[in-house]
Amino acid sequence: GLSSLPDALPSTLPKLRIMFLMKNDFTEMPSVVGSCRELEMVSFKSNRVERIRPDALRPRQDPLPASRSAFARTTTATD
């Protein structure tokens, strides 16, 4: 399985929003993850992650639009 990610990941996949890396051989969350500017969700489930590099996580710069929020609800007006 995978144990690292390419440094070119952000430029190769600039619109990457979701990344599932389940059942691989990662022992740390690679710093390149923090460089993926559009990334909203990442999973390292079933790996051996012992360390998350500080630069692998970056603070969100803009709030999630209400239409993409997990709390957004569609309502219908009724009389």
Image (cartoon, rainbow, N blue to C red):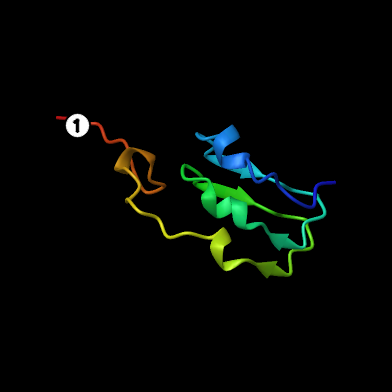
Q: Taking 30 as reference, is 40 above or below it? A: above
Q: Is residue 30 left or right of residue 60?
A: right
Q: Taking 45 as reference, is 10 above or below it? A: above
Q: Quadrant of the C terminus?
A: top left
Q: Is residue 67 left or right of residue 35?
A: left
Q: Nearer the viewer, residue 2 or 6?
A: 6
| Amino acid type indicated by mark 1 | Ala
Residue most extreme to the right: 1
Q: Where is residue 76 in the image (x, y as percent from the top left)?
A: 25, 31
Judged from the image, the secondary structure of the residue bearing numbered disc 1 is loop
Q: Which residue is drawn at 56% across and 41% down?
A: 10
Q: Position of residue 50 (x, y in %)?
A: 73, 69
Q: Nearer the viewer, residue 7 or 19?
A: 7
Query: Dot 1: few (<14), some (14–19), or many (≥20) neighbours within 10 Å?
Result: few
Q: Is residue 21 left or right of residue 35?
A: right
When asked about the image quadrant of residue 19, the answer is top right
Q: Which of 61 and 70 is in front in this view?
A: 61
Q: Residue at x 55, y 62 (%)?
A: 55
Which residue in the structure is indicated by mark 1? 77
Q: Which residue is drawn at 30% across and 43% down?
A: 66
Q: Position of residue 59 (x, y in %)?
A: 42, 60
Q: Which of 44 and 36 is in front in this view?
A: 36
* Callout count: 1
Q: Which residue is drawn at 63% across and 40% down?
A: 8
